[in-house]
Structure formats: structure tokens, C-alpha cells
Amino acid sequence: MRIERVSDSQFTIFLTFDDLIDRGFTKEDLWHDATNVRNLFSDMMYEASTELGFELEGVLLVQVHLMQAQGMHVIVTQKIENTSWEEDFIEMKVTLDESKEMIFSFKEFEDIIQVSSCLSVINMDGGQVYYMNNRYYMLLNEDELTPKNKENIIAVMSEFSSPSIITSHRLKEYGKVIMQENAVNQIMNVFYNK
């Protein structure tokens, strides 16, 4: 679990799916097991507040973004309201959404060239490539993924890259477009003369 303070009233938590499994959860549990999910979020909030020296009070707005291969990105914003409670009281308002795309981060463009060769073998020829903050990113959209190939793609990508918590919106706004579409196919044509 990675915790980072954003401001005096906001922090983020990133958990990989391995972190969730270590805590006894699956991705499906997050949608169907409300009581245990509430306990998970409470534990995470107190763990984060202890690590960051962040005093929890008032209303916590918790936005949870499930990412296909990366895990769970939680954004916690504290709203202190002028309500006088007789004792300490914290209210959590949780919103949960799921991203249908996958984004992977690469140190070198050479790694993208190598992964493209492997992706091509499993009939994956789409993708977009961006450059931002001295890293390369490959974005795979929902329409390029099928339940049949998704696990294979995740396995191949994990050998060459790291899952990224950057959103596609941020990449498109701040990143430099290297390849707008069919990145794997373009790379194969240029570097492997497919």
C-alpha cells in the first residue's frame, strides 16, 4: 500500500491487487461485500492518518477507482463542517468506479518495442503510446481487450512494465502523444518489418 499526502485536506492511497489479496479481498468483494469493504476502508483511513500525521474528523469523501491491472486508487478528501458533535465522529461517503482501460509505465522506449513483439504474438495490435515525466506509457482501451486476452496481456505487460495509476485523462492532457492508435502494429511495422 502506498500513501501520499496531496494537501492539508486530501491524501491518496494506492493498493495493488496483491495488497487487496493480502488483506483477504478480491476485486469482486469490493462490489458485493459492503460490510467488509467498509471495514477495509476504515482500516486504510486510520493506517494512512497514522503514517501521514493526518487527523481524521468530519466528513471523508472517498473516491475509489478500480483499475483493470493496476489495483485500486483511493482519493480521500476531508471536509470539516461546522457541526458540533458531542464526541469524535467521522462520516465516510464512498463512491466506487471501475476503469475499463489499462495503463502501463515503461522506463525506456526499447521496453515498448520488446513488449510489442510479445503482444503481437497474442493478436494484440492496438494501444496508444505517450511520454510524460521521463517515462513512456502504453494505454490499452476497453475495446481492445476481451475477457479471453486480458489476462494474457496483463501477464505479458507485467514482464516489461509497471502498472500505472495515472489516468488516461491526465496522460491525454499533459503527456506527449507518440502513437495515437494501433501502437503495437506501428511498432511491429517499423522495428520488425512485420
Image (tube, grey):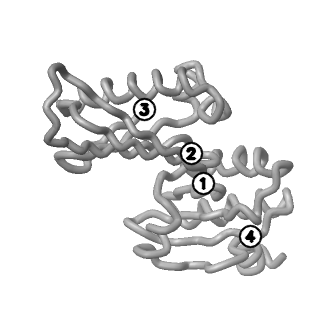
Sequence-first tag of 4 and 1: 1
Sequence-first tag of 2 and 1: 2
Kind of residue indicated by mark 1: Ser
Image quadrant where residue 28 sits: top right
Residue indicated by mark 3: 1
Q: What element carries label 1?
A: loop
| Up/down of 24 relative to 7, above or below | above
Q: Which mark is residue 126?
A: 4
* Separation of residues labelled 4 and 2 (CA atoms): 22 Å
Sequence-first tag of 1 and 3: 3
Kind of residue indicated by mark 3: Met
Q: Residue 54 carries which label?
A: none
Q: What element carries label 4?
A: loop
* Separation of residues labelled 2 and 3 (CA atoms): 14 Å
* Separation of residues labelled 4 and 3 (CA atoms): 31 Å
Sequence-first tag of 4 and 2: 2
**Residue at x-position 19% and y-position 22%:** 88
Q: Percent position (x, y) of residue 8?
A: 17, 46
Which marked residue is nearer to the observer: mark 2 or mark 3?
Answer: 2
**Residue at x-position 52% and y-position 57%:** 105
Q: What element carries label 2?
A: strand
Residue indicated by mark 1: 99
Contact (CB < 8 A) between labels 2 and 1?
yes
Q: Percent position (x, y) of residue 139?
A: 61, 64
